Image (spheres, rainbow, N blue to C red):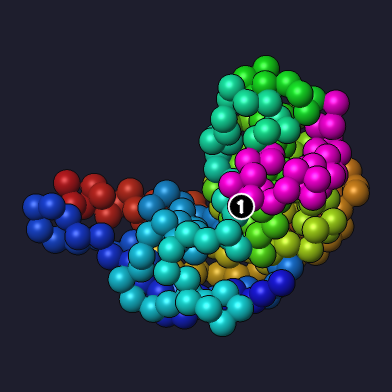
């Protein structure tokens, strides 16, 4: 497993009619192997842009990102992505979706099949392995997406609002699953979310980002993710520090949103 270093990363988007938007400015982060990092902030703070740069989908305009000392210059198998929508092959079976990565790498079936079965059991889908993806609920499809990501054995799992489209009950179950997978696999996970509660529950380390330009406003190290492994998340929310931290972050983001609205009205 490898540490991830983000050094002085900035991102500027040039506009077709002239001018530019500074999406990120001087982001510096050291993310230890096995860390579970959640990132949130108001719309336009650059959190998804940062995730896409780490994934290798975008090239930053300044700075560099290193994983285990190697510069990231594009997508690679050591980084796996889980999107808000599973981006699955809906006509394929659950098993074939999960085994797609190993198949593309030429891993022999005799070697990959037991691992695929293990991952399906890990995410609670062993009995559904022969079902077509379109037959599954949204929550189950996201479990397939997680298993497919893990099947490639990445060092880092990048999650862009992976639970955002789910109903409240399914989302809570999936939050527990993410914590269990984190503890079971020891993977580094970076999770982007708009939900303060989710960021608190799923981030042993939490970043609040501010917009224009996108930057880290405040950083927290929290006990809730560790407490939530194998536990009832509703009980974790009763922790004496949970509500106070939640209110502090909500107030911070609300102030940012008001500043953005005021700035927009001024520009108009």
**Range of the magenta residues?**
98-127
The foreground one among 103 and 181 is 103
- Dominant secondary-structure state across the stretch colored magenta: helix
Residue 125 place in picture, x, y as percent: 81, 32
Residue 35 place in picture, x, y as percent: 71, 67
The foreground one among 227 and 31 is 31
Query: Residue at left 55%, top 70%?
Result: 218
* Helix, strand or loop under label 1: helix
Quadrant, the N terminus: bottom right
Query: Residue at left 59%, top 22%?
Result: 91
| 183 to 127, vertically: above or below | below
Report if residue 88 is visible in the image: yes
Query: Residue at left 13%, top 52%?
Result: 16
Category of crowding for the residue at label 1, using alpha-carbon neighbours closer than 10 angstroms: few (below 14), some (14–19), many (at least 20): few
Q: Which residue is identified by label 1?
A: 105
Residue 8 place in picture, x, y as percent: 42, 80
Residue 243 in magenta stretch: no
Report if residue 233 is visible in the image: no
Q: Kindly indicate the quadrant of the structure image that contains residue 31.
A: bottom right
Query: Residue at left 69%, top 41%?
Result: 99
Residue 107 in magenta stretch: yes
């Amino acid at each position: 497993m490898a540490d991830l270093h983000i050094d002085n990363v900035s991102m500027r988007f040039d506009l077709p009619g002239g001018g530019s938007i500074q999406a990120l400015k001087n982001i510096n982060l050291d993310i230890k192997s096995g860390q579970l990092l959640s990132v949130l902030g108001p719309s336009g703070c650059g959190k998804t842009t940062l995730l896409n740069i780490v994934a290798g989908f975008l090239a930053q305009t300044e700075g560099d990102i290193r994983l285990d000392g190697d510069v990231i210059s594009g997508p690679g198998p050591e980084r796996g992505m889980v999107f808000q929508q599973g981006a699955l092959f809906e006509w394929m079976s659950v098993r074939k979706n999960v085994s797609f990565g190993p198949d593309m790498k030429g891993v022999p079936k005799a070697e990959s099949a037991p691992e695929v079965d293990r991952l399906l059991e890990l995410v609670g889908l062993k009995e559904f392995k022969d079902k077509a993806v379109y037959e599954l609920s949204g929550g189950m499809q996201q479990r397939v997406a997680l298993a497919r990501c893990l099947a490639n054995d990445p060092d880092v799992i990048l999650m862009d609002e992976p639970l955002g489209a789910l109903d409240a009950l399914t989302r809570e179950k999936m939050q527990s699953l993410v914590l269990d997978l984190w503890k079971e696999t020891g993977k580094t996970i970076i999770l982007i979310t708009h939900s303060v509660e989710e960021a608190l529950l799923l981030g042993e380390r939490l970043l609040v980002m501010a917009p224009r330009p996108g930057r880290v406003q405040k950083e927290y190290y929290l006990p809730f993710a560790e407490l939530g492994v194998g536990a009832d998340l509703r009980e974790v929310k009763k922790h004496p520090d949970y509500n106070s931290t939640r209110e502090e972050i909500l107030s911070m983001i609300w102030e940012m949103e008001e500043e953005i609205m005021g700035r927009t009205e001024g520009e108009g």
